[in-house]
Image (spheres, helix red, strand yellow):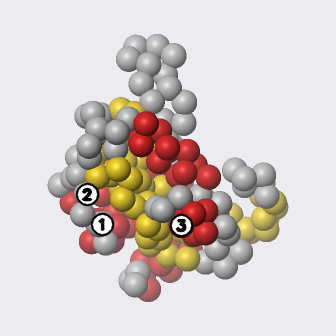
């Protein structure tokens, strides 16, 4: 269970009301702005430590571009697990990689995301890691919005470990 003080800070910093179109295309009357809660150093540190404390056995933590990267970096630092970065699209220059960091082939990986509604980006990132030979053992996020994410990830055999869940 998340520390009630940390949950209150996340909500106070990041929960905003209004009319918002989500990544899924759904329209919501509230939004969890990851940049607001991740921009506060003490809150970011405490989130990353709480995630590291719940981290399943793995070889790598992988941050999903963009919001998952600072979180996974913090979890990596707090847990001592090496970091991977999973882009949404491969670079068109330099190494042209979709997965940055070490070769994940044969590794157990935990995906780190910021806010989850449908779980769609986690599934896409897990598929890319699987193509690279990794075994995605779980996905973690800060805020589960109470959408279809849990069911989507379960249907793809991905254990799901949100730090906190809210109702839409």
Quick check: 144 above or below 66?
Answer: below
x, y percent for residue 83:
29, 45
Please report contact status of discs 2 and 3: CB closer than 8 Å, yes or no. no
The residue that appears at 62% across and 52% down in the rendered structure is: 120
The residue that appears at 55% across and 77% down in the rendered structure is: 165
Quick check: 31 above or below 72?
Answer: below
Please report contact status of discs 1 and 2: CB closer than 8 Å, yes or no. yes
Look at the image and tell me whether residue 25 can be seen: yes
The quadrant where residue 168 appears: bottom right
Label 3 sits on residue? 154
* 3D distance between C-alphas at marks 1 and 3: 18 Å
Q: Looking at the image, is mark 2 or mark 3 earlier in the sequence?
A: 2
Q: Looking at the image, is mark 1 or mark 3 earlier in the sequence?
A: 1
Q: Residue 59 or 38: which is nearer the viewer?
A: 59
Q: Residue 81 or 73: which is nearer the viewer?
A: 81
Characterize the local packing of mark 2: few (<14), some (14-19) or many (20 or more) Cα atoms within 10 angstroms.
Answer: some
Which one is in front in this view, the residue at disc 2 or the one at disc 3? Answer: 3
- Left or right: 144 as drawn, with respect to 100: right
The residue that appears at 41% across and 41% down in the rendered structure is: 129
Quadrant where the N terminus is found in the figure: bottom left
Label 2 sits on residue? 58
Residue 55: which disc? 1
Label 2: element kind: loop
Label 3: element kind: helix
x, y percent for residue 158:
46, 61
Label 1: element kind: loop
Characterize the local packing of mark 3: few (<14), some (14-19) or many (20 or more) Cα atoms within 10 angstroms.
Answer: few
Look at the image and tell me whether residue 116 can be seen: no
């Amino acid at each position: 269970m998340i520390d009630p003080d940390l949950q209150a800070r996340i909500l106070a910093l990041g929960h905003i009301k209004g009319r918002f179109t989500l990544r899924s295309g759904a329209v919501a009357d509230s939004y969890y702005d990851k940049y607001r809660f991740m921009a506060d150093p003490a809150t970011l540190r405490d989130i990353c430590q709480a995630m590291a404390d719940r981290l399943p056995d793995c070889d790598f933590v992988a941050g999903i571009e963009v919001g998952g990267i600072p979180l996974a970096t913090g979890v990596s630092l707090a847990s001592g697990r090496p970091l991977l970065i999973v882009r949404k699209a491969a670079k068109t220059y330099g190494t042209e990689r979709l997965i940055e960091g070490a070769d994940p082939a044969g590794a157990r990986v935990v995906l780190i995301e910021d806010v989850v509604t449908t779980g769609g980006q986690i599934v896409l990132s897990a598929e890319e890691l699987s193509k690279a030979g990794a075994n995605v053992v779980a996905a973690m996020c800060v805020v589960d919005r109470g959408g279809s994410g849990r069911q989507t990830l379960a249907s793809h055999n991905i254990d799901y470990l949100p730090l906190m869940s809210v109702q839409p």
